[in-house]
Amino acid sequence: MPLATTRRAGLVDQVIEQMRGAITTGEWPVGQRIPPEPELVTALGVGRNTVREAVRALSHAGLLEVRQGDGTFVRATSEISGAVRRMCGTELKEVLQVRRTLEMEGARLAAKHRTDAELARLTELLHKRDAAMESEQWAEVIEHDTAFHVLLVQCSHNTLLAELYQGLTEAVKASVAASVDTSQPGQDQVSHTGLLHAVRDGDQEKAAIEAGGFFEELIEKFC
């Protein structure tokens, strides 16, 4: 872990930035336990209290999760994703509402601006998602469904919208996982075929309606 020894001024802020960098670059992946406190103290050249304050700040921001007796784990790669991800489960409805707002506009713009290559990739991801549903490979369903939604918003070619949604990737994936009904066969899961066809046909209004519609279905079913 190539963390630089900090300067004396603003030690806590410097440690926070270095640890955040290890998280956002993927050096410390989501779900992985970070190095133990003594190792961080040595690597950073600071005291235990400084490390503890930095961990506490990043935990409050939602990037880290302290598990008593087990260590500290990476929870999310950004403050936005961390804040939203904390709502998953008990606040799944709010996560889905945020996604609905962003994806309705993303779908509308995607219907206008998507490229043929992007449409081909969307089609491929949806095919993989649906095939995984039919075979009840739920981990693959979650991966492909998440990738489909992230790419859909990227197809809007609105840089700010795409970056905002990208920052919510962990929250999106968590809400996908929470809303996949493993007790139901694949054909009874929420379909994205109408949305894909609307984007393919350049029908902006229908794309937005389709995006909003399946979120309403999920909210009614799971919330």
Image: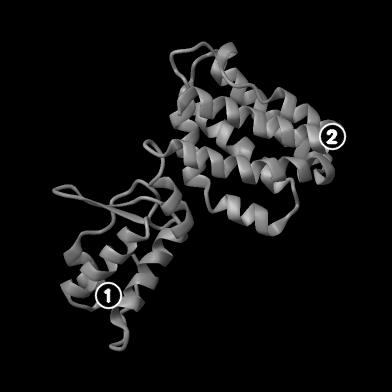
Label 1 sits on residue: 44
In the drawing, what numbered circle is on residue 85? none
Residue 26 position within the rendered picture, expressed as x and y whole percent measured from the top left: 44, 56
Can residue 92 be seen in the rendering of this structure?
A: yes
Label 2 sits on residue: 203
What residue do we see at 49% from left, 16% from top?
Answer: 136
Please determine whether, in this image, residue 4 is positioned above or below residue 131. below
Residue 213 as seen in the image, left or right of residue 78: right
Residue 213 position within the rendered picture, expressed as x and y whole percent measured from the top left: 66, 29
Q: Classify 10 Å Cα crowding around label 1: few (below 14), some (14-19), many (20 and above).
A: many
Residue 85 position within the rendered picture, expressed as x and y whole percent measured from the top left: 42, 46
Q: Which quadrant is home to the N terminus? A: bottom left
Q: CA distance from mark 2 to mark 1?
A: 54 Å
Can residue 2 be seen in the rendering of this structure?
A: no
- Label 2 residue SS: loop
Residue 172 as seen in the image, left or right of residue 153: left
| Residue placed furthest toward the left | 69
